[in-house]
Image: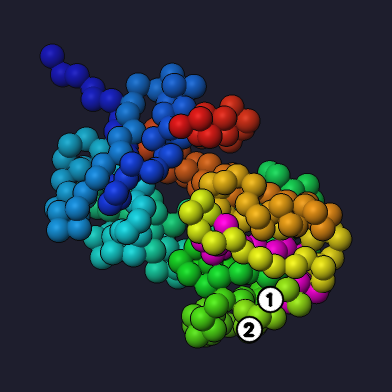
Amino acid sequence: MKTTSPPLAGVVGWPIGYSRSPALHGHWLKRYGIAGYYIPMDIAPQDFENGVRSLPRLGFRGINVTLPYKQTVLPLADKISDRAALIGAANTLIFREDGGIYADNTDGYGFIENLRQNAAGWSARNGPCLVLGAGGAARGIVSALITEGAPEIRIANRTRQRAEILKDQYGARISVIDWNRAADAMDGAMTIINTTSLGMAGQPELNISFAAAPASAIATDIVYNPLVTPFLREATAAGLVTVDGLGMLLHQAVPGFRQWFDHSPEVDAALRQAVLAA
């Protein structure tokens, strides 16, 4: 008798124990009664390529990719989405029925959807954006902001050269700000974003004044541990609307789950609680 195997997906990293993706996808699988599995997998660097290529033969429909593999996974893909190619990294793989591997980057999508859900009336078109940091996370967010029509994106990074690289890549809408002038660059900025690790548990705080920020500006941090970072606490004290980083994690998972498990999941309060409790 022929049996149908349950759909499989997972997340690959090194190490993987910190990931909250299993709790996230596990919540959705249970909520929607889907007889599938989402599996965390530690794969050492020397085993990464062979390990990923073996997964479709084991019944996997795709995986999430986290540190340190978001960039090194791209050469394994047969097709790369425009946004993953532009960013130079992927966090979502889809294993196609023809045996091919499709690589995508949904971080920017998650960032935008988090603001849409949690900041009423927000639009990238509302005015200039200030991005603190110029690493991989900033690259995905800048790409998404440009796609969404941000008129100007100011980038401040401790190493100015890295910000200049983003300006070279993304063009005229980018302006580079010296790190020690970042607080002044809040003048007129309608969206203020921390993409650095400053303020994360175990990291130094990001000390910055919001005195120049418009009263109607939105401040958001991609860090979600702690949920209320010093950056967000200072923004709230200055009277700004704030959006924490957990929603970005939740929303970036939606496209992959939809592809792997044939269901469009909902990001809601119950999902937040499930992931926070993990």
Residue 253 horizontal side relative to residue 244, left or right: left
Mark 1, residue position: 182
Q: Secondary structure at mark 2?
A: strand
Please identify the quarter of the rendering in which residue 177 is found: bottom right
* Res. 28 visible in picture: no
Instruction: State the residue in front, 204 or 64.
Output: 204
- Above or below, 52 against 193 in this view is above
**Where's residue 78, x and y in %?**
27, 60
Q: Secondary structure at mark 1?
A: loop
Crowd class of label 1 (few under 14; some 14 to 19; many from 20; radius 10 Å): many
Query: What residue do we see at 68% from left, 49% from top?
Result: 243
Residue 6 horizontal side relative to residue 83, left or right: left
Crowd class of label 2 (few under 14; some 14 to 19; many from 20; radius 10 Å): some
Image: magenta residue range: 185-199
Residue 107 horizontal side relative to residue 10, left or right: right
Q: Main secondary structure of the magenta part?
A: loop
**Where's residue 118, x and y in %?**
70, 44
Mark 2, residue position: 178
The type of residue carrying mark 1 is Ala
Query: What residue do we see at 78% from left, 47% from top?
Result: 120
The type of residue carrying mark 2 is Asp
Q: Quadrant of the N terminus?
A: top left
**Where's residue 96, x and y in %?**
29, 46
